[in-house]
């Protein structure tokens, strides 16, 4: 009761009395957070703005905020630079990588979490340590090997590399989610007559769906934005969006209009995926399983 | 189906001996309860029946066949888990029929059994809900239903009622008993709640530290506990333990309160030959177990009665728990625990009153003071009796 009354009093007096200390700090905190968010969002805002500007406005020395929007840059992008194919490459490579990584990752993580693999702790750390490797260290070896295997500039070549890079991280993440699945759930399934693989797909995977969703988001973002390996291992047929964007920076000029349009297009699927899967990243799927 | 354990041992890789040389037979259709404190090995035993643990030594027979190393899937035992372990992403219906589907039972048979089980448990209206939408009691029912629908050879239950509140627990207990009376499927039930064990079981096995201490009907366990541990574990309020001296008197034993001059006149225990020898070794020192309802109180001094002061009266509704303090030199209980007597609550009794407590000679157990083993008992097979203490 007292808290309600106090809250009422505070509400009534807020106009006449000076703000209480904790409240002041809270407001300052909010202001600071808002500032940081604005700072982070400004480049995004600017890029979106630029992508709709006519060339003249883009190259103008005085930044302009009011102009007549045009789709010229986008038209240019698809007409002159065959951006549709590039976009398709990115989508194929990223989606395939996500599926393979999550599929293999969940099985590997399950084995590590539940099946008494000898030296399981060392193995888990060793798997993660693959991730410590700077990509540039293996870029050239990969290039040479891919050349021998005829995998240069192919979707498969890029997908294999991305799977290798992302799998350790996925295993590590999923292992944590799997550890939270109550063991009784699997034992109940075992007594219900399910095989190990059936238990994994019919009981465990649906329970850790939120974990799969967040893992997928990470893998999607990493792969969608990957630049170095794509630059090294592709040239024409399998070129991805980040590599193409970099090509708008030319020796004597920068094609700001096309570049901005490409960046905006690259941003859209990422935002879509995050918003789409965000719904699933709600913990509490396991609620009701135990107790 | 009957269940037999032969020399079962379970030693975990870290050296912990969970179950030590267990020999046990559970008869076909019996409701058998493993009772004991946490960590006594009862759940491990249950899990070995299910096949979730493999014994380190010994054999498990189900219906005469050796099932020691059979995969859980091929055992045809159903288990109700303490946490229920319902599949959270499936509806109640899917939870119930998953097993039948995996075993490729015909669709119309599945539907028939589903109807039957949901009617039996009164869960018809819950079939399309998800476990998270249900209350604890409802989830417990679904877990039970998931086991029932399979019509298994053996039911295993691991503290299935411990997550329910008291009222619901008692109601479900009654239903469980009725269900077993009807179906008569061999059931092994694990609990640390002695009341649950007494109410439900045909027979009880008491475990402690991985050992099976005693097996018997609830009445046998209560009346003739094999050791101090069993006596203390079963029965509320707990059994009273009094240090006594026991002297051979002819073929019987005469008892006296140790440290006091009180001779428990009129109480003699018939003892086997070995007991007198053992008592002689112990210098005649033993511990007498007295059930709280096996005492009568009187305001008048009588021969063999122990003088005491009423220290506390705890009303329990139909009965009162009366805490006594012995009023003699040196006459105390073991570990100074309160001496509790159960009395009908309509008996007039004043706080601080001086009373004489007479022990009912037919309900006493004499224990070896060192080993805790029962030496002699005077309780012959007798009718279960409500607290019948009275004051005259």
Image: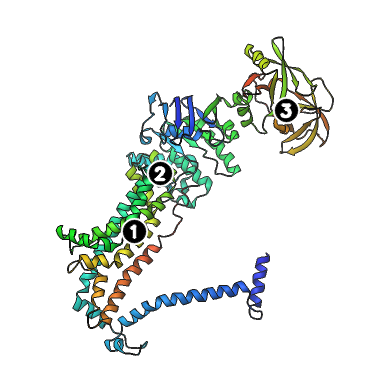
Chain for numbered disc 2: A
In the picture, measured across the screen, residue A266 lies left or right of residue A285, that is: left
Q: Secondary structure at mark 3?
A: loop
User: In which quarter of the view is residue B299 placed?
Assistant: top right
Q: CA distance from mark 2 to mark 1?
A: 33 Å
Q: Nearer the viewer, mark 3 or mark 1?
A: 1
Q: CA distance from mark 3 to mark 1?
A: 77 Å
Q: x, y percentage for residue B37?
A: 57, 35
Quadrant in the picture for the N terminus of chain B: top left
Q: x, y percentage for residue A258?
A: 26, 79
Pointer 2 residue: A186
- Label 3 Cα crowd, 10 Å radius (few <14 / some 14-19 / many 20+): few
Quadrant in the picture for the C terminus of chain B: top right
User: In this view, which residue lies farthest toward the right?
Assistant: B300
Do the residues marked 3 and 1 share a common chain? Answer: no
Q: CA distance from mark 2 to mark 3?
A: 50 Å
Pointer 3 residue: B388
Q: Who comes first in sequence, dot 2 or dot 1?
A: 1
- Label 1 Cα crowd, 10 Å radius (few <14 / some 14-19 / many 20+): few
Q: Nearer the viewer, mark 2 or mark 3?
A: 2
Q: Secondary structure at mark 1?
A: helix
In the picture, measured across the screen, residue A274 lies left or right of residue B282, that is: left
| Label number found at residue A132 | 1
In the picture, measured across the screen, residue B119 lies left or right of residue B389, that is: left
Residue B223 or residue B202, whichever sits in front: B223
Q: Secondary structure at mark 2?
A: helix
Q: Is residue B119 visible?
A: no
Q: x, y percentage for residue A216?
A: 34, 60
Do the residues marked 2 and 3 share a common chain? Answer: no
Residue B81 or residue B384, whichever sits in front: B81
In the picture, measured across the screen, residue A245 lies left or right of residue A4, that is: left
Chain for numbered disc 3: B
């Amino acid at each position: 009761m007292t808290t309600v009354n106090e809250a009422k009093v505070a509400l009534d007096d807020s106009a006449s009395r000076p703000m209480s200390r904790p409240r002041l700090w809270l407001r300052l905190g909010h202001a600071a957070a808002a500032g940081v968010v604005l700072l982070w969002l400004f480049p995004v805002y600017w890029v979106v703005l630029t992508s709709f500007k006519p060339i003249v406005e883009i190259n103008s020395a005085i930044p302009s905020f009011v102009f007549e929007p045009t789709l010229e840059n986008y038209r240019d992008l698809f007409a002159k630079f065959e951006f549709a194919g590039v976009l398709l490459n990115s989508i194929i490579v990223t989606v395939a990588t996500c599926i393979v990584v999550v599929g293999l990752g969940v099985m590997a993580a399950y084995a590590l979490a539940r099946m008494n693999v000898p030296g399981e702790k060392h193995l888990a750390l060793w798997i993660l340590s693959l991730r410590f490797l700077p990509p540039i260290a293996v870029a050239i070896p990969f290039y040479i090997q891919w050349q021998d295997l005829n995998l240069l500039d192919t979707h498969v070549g890029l997908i294999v590399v991305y799977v290798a890079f992302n799998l350790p991280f996925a295993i590590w993440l999923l292992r944590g989610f799997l550890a939270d699945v109550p063991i009784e759930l699997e034992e109940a399934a075992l007594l219900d007559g399910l095989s190990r693989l059936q238990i994994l797909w019919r009981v465990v995977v649906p329970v850790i769906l939120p974990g799969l969703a967040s893992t997928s988001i990470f893998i999607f973002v990493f792969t969608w934005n990957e630049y170095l390996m794509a630059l090294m291992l592709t040239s024409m047929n399998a070129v991805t969006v980040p590599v193409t964007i970099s090509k708008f920076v030319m020796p004597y000029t920068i094609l700001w209009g096309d570049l901005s349009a490409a960046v905006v297009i690259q941003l859209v699927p990422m935002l879509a995926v995050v918003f789409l899967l965000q719904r699933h990243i709600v913990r509490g799927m396991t609620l009701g399983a135990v107790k | 189906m009957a269940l037999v354990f032969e020399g079962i041992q379970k030693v975990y890789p870290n050296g912990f001996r969970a179950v030590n040389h267990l020999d046990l037979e559970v008869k076909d259709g019996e409701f058998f309860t493993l009772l004991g404190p946490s960590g006594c090995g009862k759940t491990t035993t249950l899990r070995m029946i299910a096949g979730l643990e493999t014994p380190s030594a010994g054999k498990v027979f189900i219906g005469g066949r050796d099932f020691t190393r059979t995969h859980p899937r091929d055992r045809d035992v159903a288990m109700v888990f303490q946490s229920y372990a319902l599949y959270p992403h499936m509806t109640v219906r899917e939870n119930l029929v998953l097993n039948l589907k995996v075993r490729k039972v015909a669709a119309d048979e599945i539907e028939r059994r589903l109807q039957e089980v949901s009617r039996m448990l009164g869960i018809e209206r819950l079939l399309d809900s998800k476990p998270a939408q249900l209350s604890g009691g409802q989830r417990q029912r679904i877990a039970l239903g998931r086991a029932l629908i399979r019509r298994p050879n053996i039911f295993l239950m691991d503290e299935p009622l411990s997550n329910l509140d008291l009222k619901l627990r008692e109601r479900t207990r009654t239903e469980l008993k009725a269900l077993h009376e009807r179906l008569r499927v061999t059931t092994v039930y694990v609990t640390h709640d002695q009341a649950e064990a007494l109410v439900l079981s045909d027979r009880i096995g008491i475990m402690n530290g991985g050992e099976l201490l005693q097996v018997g009907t609830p009445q046998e366990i209560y009346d003739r506990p094999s050791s101090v541990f069993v006596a203390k574990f079963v029965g509320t309020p707990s059994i009273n333990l009094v240090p006594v001296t026991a002297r051979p008197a002819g073929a019987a034993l005469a008892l006296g309160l140790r440290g006091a001059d009180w001779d428990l006149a009129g109480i003699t225990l018939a003892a086997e030959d070995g007991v007198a020898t053992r008592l002689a070794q112990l210098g005649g020192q033993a511990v007498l177990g007295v059930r709280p309802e096996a005492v009568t109180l009187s305001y008048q001094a009588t021969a063999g009665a122990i003088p005491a002061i009423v220290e506390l009266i705890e009303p329990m509704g139909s009965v009162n728990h009366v805490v006594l303090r012995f009023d003699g030199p040196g006459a105390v209980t073991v570990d100074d625990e309160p001496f509790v007597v159960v009395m009908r609550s309509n008996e007039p009794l004043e706080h601080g009153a001086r009373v004489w407590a007479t022990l009912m000679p037919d309900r006493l157990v004499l224990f070896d003071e060192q080993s805790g083993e029962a030496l002699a008992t005077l309780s012959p097979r007798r009718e279960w009796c409500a607290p019948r203490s009275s004051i005259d």
